[in-house]
Image (tube, helix red, strand yellow):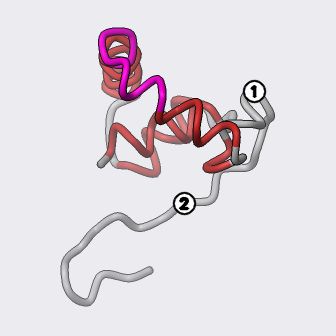
Amino acid sequence: MKEAVIVLGRRSGILNKELAAALGMDPSAVTKRMEAARLRREENVGLRKLEAALAANGVAGIKGHGEKVKCQYVNLDPSPGAAL
């Protein structure tokens, strides 16, 4: 789940340090997960086709790749009573 948020966040122009802060991770872990996702994408034709289909429909900011956006922090804590 965090890996997907990282990939979408980076493609939307959110900085590593902003993603790291929002996800409670070290910035180096964000970089490592982004690299792992890139390698997995290169090896998996299905992921590339899915990405192309999403981009064609402008889903998840992929179409606007490279645009800078302001990071809005989201609480990803699934525990009951977690503040939003």
Residue in view at x 33 percent, y 31 percent: 26
Q: Which of 69 and 7 is in front in this view?
A: 7
Quarter assignment of residue 69: top right
Location of mark 1 (residue): 66
| Residue 42, horizontal then vertical, whole percent | 38, 10
Q: Nearer the viewer, residue 42 or 74?
A: 42
Q: Earlier in the sequence, mark 2 or mark 1?
A: 1
Quadrant of the snapshot with the C terminus: bottom left
Magenta residues?
A: 41-49
User: Could you tell whether 18 is left or right of 83 in the image?
Assistant: right
Q: Is residue 64 above or below residue 79?
A: above
Location of mark 2 (residue): 73
Quarter assignment of residue 5: top left
Task: Tell whether label 1 touches label 2 (CB within 8 Å).
Answer: no
Provide the secondary structure element on which disc 2 rests: loop
Q: What residue type is labelled 1?
A: Gly
Q: Residue 81 carries which label?
A: none
Q: Distance between the residues labelled 2 and 1?
A: 19 Å
Residue in view at x 32 percent, y 25 percent: 33
Residue in view at x 31 percent, y 18 percent: 44
Quarter assignment of residue 36: top left
Q: Nearer the viewer, residue 46 or 5?
A: 46
Residue 43 part of the magenta-drawn span: yes
Q: Which amino acid does label 2 sit on?
A: Tyr
Of tags 2 and 1, which is closer to the observer? 1
Residue in view at x 36 percent, y 20 percent: 28
| Residue 8, horizontal then vertical, whole percent | 53, 40
Single out the residue that lies furthest toward the bottom.
81
Single out the residue that lies furthest toward the left.
79
- Which is the main secondary structure of the residues drawn in magenta? helix
| Residue 16, horizontal then vertical, whole percent | 52, 29
